[in-house]
Amino acid sequence: MVDALRVLVHHESPTNSKSLMDVLADYLALRFQRVGVQAQVLDNPYGGNHVRVDCCPEGVDENAKPGLIICHFDTVWPEGTLETMPFYTQDDCAYGPGTYDMKASIVMVEFALRAMRDLEQFPTRPLVLLLNSDEETGSPTSRDLIEKQAAESEYVFVMEPSLIQGGVKTSRKGVGYFEMVAQGLSAHAGVEPEKGRSAIVEIAHQIQTLHALNDYEVGTTVNIGVVDGGTRSNVVPERAHLIIDTRAWTQEEADRVTHAILTLQSQTEGVQVRTWGGFNRPPMPRSPHVLRLYEKVAAVAADLEMELPEYGVGGGSDANLTAAIGIPTLDGLGPVGAGAHAAYEHIRLDTWAQRTTLLTSCLLRL
């Protein structure tokens, strides 16, 4: 498994590089074909190609709804990161870009299928694995593929990494992305500033309005992450720009924030304001169908003498998409580790095989 992970990490795969992503897609399809299952590359003209894997061995009820497993193979790391952040193992951990988020999860699925093949034990229903190339940017080209397959499936396992405590994720906040542009009028700041209309002053007012949308008691956050504008200190700035990240546990809160942001009006005479955006991942609530699936998986974990706590997290994933259309979904079944999107990204090897055993057992028993 470590050798397989090393190879995947050495295939650098930043989301915005179609050429690198397509090379890895071809390689992943080949790896799964060698396991004895069907794997095909799905052409994607708008980004990296996706991969679909079908496991339907002889004797499986082909009419049964399949179990769906979702992984992504894109990372946030640009090409060349391996030069300063190489793959290595130390103190029972494996480090490197994409190890934790989430190439180690792909290895887990491959070795779960290998175990089934070698033991000649298979689930009674087919299995489908979707490997998508754009999760890190909100799954814009894979969303339809994911939702369509999920709608035809009995349950969904999303193989995002586990939390450090080894738990799985039964709820996630929805994630929104918005931008705002203020357009004013430039003027000389020393000679005739009164003729200018400052876009930055307007943006300052808007920041206060946006910040007031936060409701920490219910978990709704509005974060102004990027602010830019102006040209020189002696010019009244005619343009300013904001990028806003929003998170909400419920659709009601997501709708409230969306409406508030998209209907913001200018507070400065002579300055126009324009906003656009929305929630690209709906909230994943801790719903009854999610809890029923969690209870089944927790029972398998108990048989393996594993503790499997559940958590809610503020980040989004493809689980938000499948849970939102009412399909039983469980997230965070990947490896234990830490450092997603950070220089110390790593997985813990001491629990990796155990987590793969849990995955294999769940696929067989569900």
Image: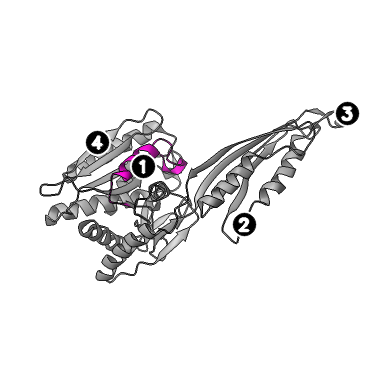
Residue 349 in view in this figure: no
- The answer for how far apart the CA atoms under marks 1 and 4 are is 18 Å
Q: Earlier in the sequence, mark 1 or mark 3?
A: 1
Q: Earlier in the sequence, mark 1 or mark 2?
A: 1
Q: Which residue is drawn at the image coordinates 85% and 28% (left, top)?
A: 195
Residue at 35 percent of width and 67 percent of height: 308
Q: Which residue is mark 3?
A: 192
Residue type indicated by callout 2: Asp
Rendered location of residue 274, percent (x, y): 66, 33
Quadrant in which the N terminus is drawn: bottom left
Mark with earlier residue (1, 4): 4
In three-dimensional space, the C-alpha distance between marks 3 and 4, rounded to whole angstroms, equals 65 Å
In this rendered view, identify the residue nearer to me: 212 or 102. Answer: 212
Quarter-of-image position of residue 240: top right
Q: Is residue 314 left or right of residue 365?
A: right
Q: Is residue 65 above or below residue 335?
A: above
The boundaries of the magenta stretch are: 133-156
Secondary structure under the numbered disc 2 in the rendered image: loop
Spot occupied by residue 280 in the image (x, y as percentages of width and height): 49, 42
CA distance separating discs 1 and 3 = 57 Å
**Mark 1 or mark 3, which is nearer to you?**
1
Q: What's the CA distance linking mark 4 and mark 2?
A: 45 Å
| Residue designated by label 4 | 40
The circle on residue 86 is none
Mark 1 = which residue?
147
Q: Is residue 2 magenta?
A: no
What amino acid is labelled 1 in the image?
Glu
Q: Earlier in the sequence, mark 2 or mark 3?
A: 3
Query: Tag 4, which secondary structure?
Result: strand
Q: Are marks 1 and 4 in contact (CB under 8 Å)?
A: no
Q: Per the image, is 141 magenta?
A: yes
